Structures are given as structure tokens and as C-alpha cells.
Image (cartoon, helix red, strand yellow):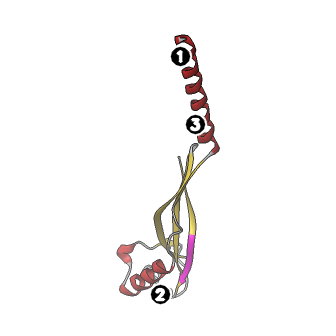
Amino acid sequence: MKELFSTLREAPLNNHCPKCFSRDGLQVTFKQKHLKTMWYNKRTDEVTSTLFCNTCNQQIFPVDWDEDIERVYEYQRKASPPKPSYFKPSKNLYIAVGLSLVALGGIAAYAFIAMV
């Protein structure tokens, strides 16, 4: 099973970085999770986010955030709602179901003919 993430939104922040104290360079990214298997494709409601400083090239974890960053993060999170989830069967699933129905039909026909 492959876990893929599609970017919902990338937004620059004008807050000070808690690591390097630069005012430029903070960027928050929201990504939505997709599951892809041999049998189906599924988009989930799970959204992950990262806060990254492009000036000092470090990820900023929530424990280091101040109130201003939290406030702007919440605003950006509400501004980027997840896309609707879906479940889409693949061709392999349709083929497997079709072959099993044909096999069951063959078994039922053989049983019916054997009884007669």
C-alpha cells in the first residue's frame, strides 16, 4: 500500500522564526493523505501540516511555536479545508469480482447438470 500526500496549500508566514529569529522564510504546508493499493484508490480526511523555515532550513515543531504562530496557523488551517474523501475501485478489483462470478456460475451449472 502506497501512502501519497497531495499538497492542499503552502502559505508563507510573516512571523519570527523561533530558531533563527528571521521575519522572512516561515512557510506552512498542508497535505492530504491518499492510499493507493492494487485493488483501490482512496483519499482520506487526514491532513498533515509542517512549518518550515527557509532561512535556517529547519522544521519548526509545535512545541517551539509562540501564540502569534499558533493564531496564524489556525487561520491557515481553516482556510485550507480537506478535499472530500473518496473510494475508487481499480480495474483489478473489477476483474477479480468478474472472474469469481464466472467461476461460481460455472460451479453452479456443473452442480445443476450433475444432479439431472
Q: Which residue is mark 2?
A: 15
The residue closer to the viewer here, 104 or 66, is 104
Residue type at mark 2: give it. Asn
Label 3, label 1: how many angstroms apart (C-alpha)? Answer: 21 Å
Q: Which residue is mark 3?
A: 97
Discs 3/1, front: 1
Asked if 47 appears above or below 99 in the picture, the reply is: below
- The structure residue drawn at horizontal position 54% and vertical position 68%, both measured from the top left corner, is 83
The residue closer to the viewer here, 7 or 115, is 115
Which secondary structure lies at badge 2?
loop
Discs 3/2, front: 3
Residue numbers of the magenta segment:
8-12
Q: Residues within 10 Å of mark 3 (few under 14, many from 20)?
A: few
Which of pointers 2 and 1 lies earlier in the amino acid sequence? 2
Residue type at mark 1: give it. Ala
Which of pointers 3 and 2 lies earlier in the amino acid sequence? 2
Which of pointers 3 and 1 lies earlier in the amino acid sequence? 3
Asked if 72 appears above or below 43 in the picture, the reply is: below
- Looking at the rendered image, the quarter that the C terminus falls into is top right
Q: Residues within 10 Å of mark 1 (few under 14, many from 20)?
A: few
Label 3, label 2: how many angstroms apart (C-alpha)? Answer: 54 Å
